[in-house]
Amino acid sequence: MSNKLMRPIQLKGHERPITQVKYNREGDLIFSTAKDHHICVWYSANGERLGTYHGHRGTVWSVEVDNTTTYILTASADLSGKLWSAETGECIQTWNFESPVKRVELSPDNKKLFFLTDNVMGQMGKIQIFNIDLSKGGNQETEPVLSIVNQGDASTKVTIATWSYDGKYILAGHADGSISKYDSQTGEELAHSTPFKNQVTDLQTSSDKTYFVASSKDQTAKLFDVESWKQLKEYSSGSPVNAALITPVKDFIILGGGQDARDVTTTSGSEGGFDAKIFHKIFEDEIGRIKGHFGPLNCLSIHPDGTSYVSGGEDGFIRLHHLPKSYFEFQYEVEKTAEALQHQSANAENVEASA
């Protein structure tokens, strides 16, 4: 697969490394956060910046968008989470915590959210779950209904988390390379395994949230089934992986990462592993690379329809890629054969039916 026909749009609105990029539900907007204390919103069609949200006093680690793009939520190192009007940029509620907030995410039905707080400053790391009613605007509950507390030290803290289908579970990755599945109603740990040799850096689900991909600094990403907790596939990158996603439409996995920024001196993009790498989800082969960033890729997000994706880098740039025709047409010979046989069988059935 070649990326020669794909001309990415470079988005420059942040002065520091990018920490998260996220499409809204319709895919027409992209939200981005960075270490420069603010949040940007962009048109996904052409990369035009629509606006900036100001109010945090520290690194903004995470952003979430509700299902109607009426509100956004953010998580920051300034010990707070915030609720904003997506349209006006007004901050309408703040939750205060005792340690930096690394992640925020709404449940699929938008009736709950969690904030992930860090295991630092003498505080235990926690996944704190809140009820939320967005019809009330800024009048939200300030106390969590459930806290899932990391019982170990900083070496086992939760580094990333996400909701499963129906908000039934919270899936979490840990600093020691382990992953966990928690009951979102009781906080009980239902499954735990250690498939990685180093920190889990990202965890993103499929469109139906029944399986997920997790990435690690041990240079791999792996695919897991939510219910059975079985490992399904493994993808070897050759450099630390900071982000991984599952593409809709095509059976692909996209990985991003690279050599840590502190280890980079005069390393070129190819040597540092700063390319986004596309793997076949089923066959586990690397089938393409997309160059562009001048430092590690920190985060990835894909359009809900699978037509474009964005990457955020340590270099402070966001790159928006509208995927070319060759991406959607790519198939292995075995896939082409299976498709041809399927059409042949369907045609034969139609002939029999008409007879």
Image (cartoon, rainbow, N blue to C red):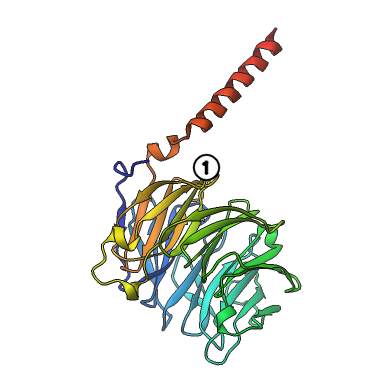
List the single residue furthest toward the left. Answer: 266
Examine the image and state in which quarter residue 192 appears.
Answer: bottom right
From the viewer's perspective, is residue 326 above or below residue 49?
above
Instruction: Please provide percent x and percent y for residue 57.
Output: 41, 84
**Which of 230 and 49 lies nearest the eye of the viewer?**
230
Instruction: Please provide percent x and percent y for residue 172.
Output: 61, 69
The residue shown at (34%, 60%) is 274
Disc 1 marks a residue whose amino acid type is: Val
Left of 268 or right of it: where is 195?
right
Instruction: Please provide percent x and percent y for residue 45.
Output: 37, 50
From the viewer's perspective, is residue 68 above or below residue 17?
above
Image label count: 1
The residue shown at (51%, 85%) is 79
Image quadrant occupied by the C terminus: top right
Left of 350 or right of it: where is 255?
left
Q: Residues within 10 Å of mark 1 (few under 14, many from 20)?
A: few
The residue shown at (47%, 56%) is 236
Image quadrant occupied by the N terminus: top left
The residue shown at (63%, 83%) is 152
Q: Identify the residue position indicated by label 1 in the image.
A: 249
From the viewer's perspective, is residue 100 above or below residue 85?
below
